[in-house]
Image (cartoon, rainbow, N blue to C red):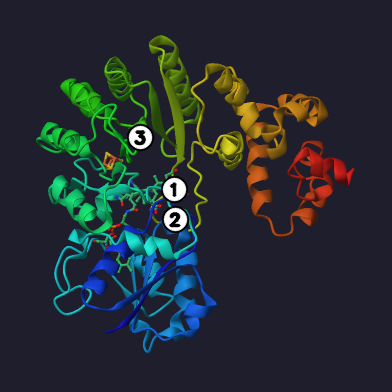
Amino acid sequence: MSNILLVEPDYRSKFPPLGLMRISTYHKERGDCVTFVRGRSPEKREMHWHRVYISSLFTWELPRTVKTILYYSKSVTSLKDIFVGGIGATLQPEYIKKRVECTVIEGQIEKRGVLGQNSPPIAHVIPDYSILNSVDYNYEGANAYFVRITKGCVRNCKFCAVPKLEPEFGLLAPLEQQTDAIKKVHGVKQNLIVMDNNVLAVEGIKNHLRVIEELGFTKGSKLNNRERTVDFNQGIDARLIAAEPELSEALGRIPVKPIRLAFDFVSPRMERDYCKAITLLSKQGFSAFTTYLLYNYNDTPEQFYNRLRINTDLNEKLGIRISGFPMRYIPISDTKRGYVSSKWKWRWLRGIQCVLQATRGLVSPNSEFVQAAFGKNTDEFFEILSMPDRYIVYREHYKTHGAKEWLRKFRSLSVPDKNEFLELLERLNKDGNRKQTIATIRKYRSLIEHYYPNGETAPHTPEEEQAIS
Ligand code: B12
Ligand code: SF4
């Protein structure tokens, strides 16, 4: 019997670490003793483990992942007994290998023998939900079946990591087999979370949707007096619904909540397909939508604003509620999350983040909200995004306390000067000697004062500002 430690680094994680949960099942079936922790635990570090498994997720969390690996490096006989895998490790294995000589497992584990002599293909093993009880962390979906009908995707969008993570599109184990196995060991689950990248693309999708109904997920179905829901978590492809309207009818029989679509890039065809899909789905009784909106890729800020307006127009026309979910593009090689595309400016990206701060990343479906938050037209949109953080977040308060004067000065700049000024703000943001740098700047000095009063980082809230003055 071996002592096995499973570690999820302590980054923010919404869903449970499915890879580790599958590895747990494998080791428990071998009769090993399995312990799960999040992050760096001094108590667990003091112990000796035959093997430590550390998961990875987003590439910008790789620095934290490496820190976690190093933390447990003395808890094993050899560094090779630390196994690291998952999404971040698959996208950037070299980042880890250059820093620690642990065992890095790339990609899905679909073959025998990857984790030891004759070990099973982990991708097909049932996740062990019970490990979640040992940590004091609230994962969403702990009461849901996590399933996947397919792997990979039929498309090859350049901004997406899926073609690298799962290069082949194909079917996985039948849905009912997956839910039955979870049910048998961990009991009946309330909801269904379908993690597929692009589920509607699979041949015979209507049969799979029918299976979902047969599993007890029909519109209005309840368990323990609570509504049962199905979440196609990565969104469904609007283009496929527009091409095959019957798909909306099949979806209409399932309690999909929320219904997620993507409006990632901008082309007249995409716009037409997106509007058509929303219209078809609204006819099936869906009224609350969440739409992923990729920005900072090859779109312009105007195109981002335009997509927000298309959503508010659809809301008004169809009497529905589409909440936008802006997703900032981060290249899959990025370990810092700092990328700024040539059509955007750092200050505008920061501005979007400030606007979304109060709404947990969502753009409300309310047209008045969109106009107030992002501006009535693109001129106002650019001005809002260019403002100092606190003027954006506490708009009402600062309207008369600084923002008016800022706006007057900002508007007096020529277009090239505005660009130069915004670029200066990006440089100042990264500047370790900011105060000294600002002291040497003459041009834009009074505007800079709004962002860095006396050269210092500005207070975050009106209360903090009052306390200082
Ligand atoms: C579900 C999901 C989410 C969920 C949360 C995920 C979570 N676990 O908490 C939500 C919806 C919240 C989300 C949000 C985002 N996501 Co996301 N998400 C995914 C998705 C679909 C699956 C991730 C997952 O959990 N998979 C489950 C895996 C880990 O389990 P598994 O399959 O059983 O694992 C196998 C192997 O990986 C391996 N393995 C797994 N773990 C381990 C551990 C060890 C030790 C070993 C040996 C092996 C191993 O073995 C398993 C069996 O084969 C991926 C796309 C994809 N297809 O992978 C994108 C993805 C990870 N997301 C991505 C992005 C960009 C985002 C967002 C930034 C989007 C945005 N702009 O807002 C946000 C960021 C949120 C944040 N925290 O800041 C990108 C990441 C790119 C990158 N540079 O890292 C991906 C790759 C999508 C994409 N299309 O590019 N996401
Ligand atoms: S359709 Fe979606 S999952 Fe498929 S490659 Fe494009 S962004 Fe990725």
Nearer to us: label 2 or label 3: 3
Earlier residue among tags 2 and 3: 3
**Circle 2 — which element?**
loop
- Crowd band around label 3 with a 10 angstrom C-alpha radius: few (<14), some (14–19), many (20+): few
Query: Which residue is pictured at 9% across the width and 35% down the height?
Result: 204
CA separation in Å, label 1 and label 3: 41 Å
Q: Residue 330, labelled with which disc?
A: 1
Residue 312 drawn above or below residue 346: above
Which quadrant is home to the N terminus? bottom left
Label 2 is placed on what type of residue? Answer: Asp
Crowding around mark 2 (Cα neighbors within 10 Å: few <14, some 14 to 19, many 20+) is: some
Q: Quadrant of ligand 2?
A: top left
Q: Earlier in the sequence, mark 1 or mark 3?
A: 3
Residue 425: image quadrant is top right
Residue 5 percent coordinates (x, y)? 38, 75
- Decide if residue 171 is in sight here: no
Where disc 1 sits, the SS reads: loop
Mark 1 residue CB less than 8 A from any atom of ligand 1:
yes
Q: Nearer the viewer, mark 1 or mark 3?
A: 3
Image coordinates of residue 365 in percent, x first then y, are: 48, 22
Q: Is residue 284 above or below residue 451?
A: above
Mark 2 lies on residue: 334
Give percent across and percent down for residue 124: 18, 59
Q: Is residue 340 visible?
A: yes
Residue corresponding to mark 3 = 225
Structural distance between the alpha carbons of marks 2 and 1: 6 Å
Question: In this orientation, which residue lies closer to the viewer: 31 or 82?
Answer: 31
